[in-house]
Amino acid sequence: MTRTVAREIAVHMVFELGFGDRSARQLLEEELTPENFALIGAEEQLYADFPDEVQEQYIRTLVTGVFDHGPELDDYISRHAVGWSFARIPRVAAAIMRVAMYEMLYMPDIPNAAAINEAVEIAKGYETPEVVSFINGILGTFARSEFPESDQ
């Protein structure tokens, strides 16, 4: 499993956190299991292989980090989504942006440009071109305003 696949699985789990009242820990205990991957993997190629130790930890870090910093990440999205109310943003788009923003803020080993590019590529599989452009714009503006000294 690649980091790209692990990131997309983390986006799925972050999206799922938006429904119900499970904590990130509960969701990961229930969903991030070899048995669950075997069940889902029969129909969804993304889940065909259970992550190795490194990728499993990466998924756990993203899901728990986004859960723990949810209000902060949503505030960033709201501030940079000029002319859009947060409620109007598709839930998948919000999950994608939360993961990318978490990576930019809290995972310094991941370049901002890589986090943005990965988010845009994931979005292409789930959203319309207009929403993909919206995600790209929000994340680009976020990176420029929060990390003005870094190379994009």
Image (tube, rainbow, N blue to C red):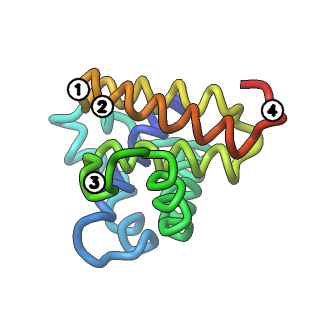
Amino acid residing under circle 1: Thr
Q: Which mark is residue 36?
A: 3
Residue 25 located left or right of residue 17: right
Q: Residue furthest right?
A: 149
Disc 1 designates what residue? Answer: 128
**What residue do we see at 53% from left, 24% from top?**
117
Disc 4 designates what residue? Answer: 150
- Whether tag 2 and tag 1 are in contact, CB under 8 A, the answer is yes
3D distance between C-alphas at marks 2 and 3: 30 Å
Amino acid residing under circle 2: Val
3D distance between C-alphas at marks 3 and 4: 40 Å
Q: Return the x and y of residue 48 as percentages of the image width and height.
A: 31, 34
> Which mark is in front, 3 or 4?
4
Q: Return the x and y of residue 90 as percentages of the image width and height.
A: 25, 46
Amino acid residing under circle 4: Ser
Q: Earlier in the sequence, mark 3 or mark 4?
A: 3
Secondary-structure class at tag 1: loop
Classify mark 3: residues with Cα within 10 Å, few (<14), some (14-19) or many (20+).
Answer: few
Q: Which mark is residue 131?
A: 2
- Whether tag 4 and tag 1 are in contact, CB under 8 A, the answer is no
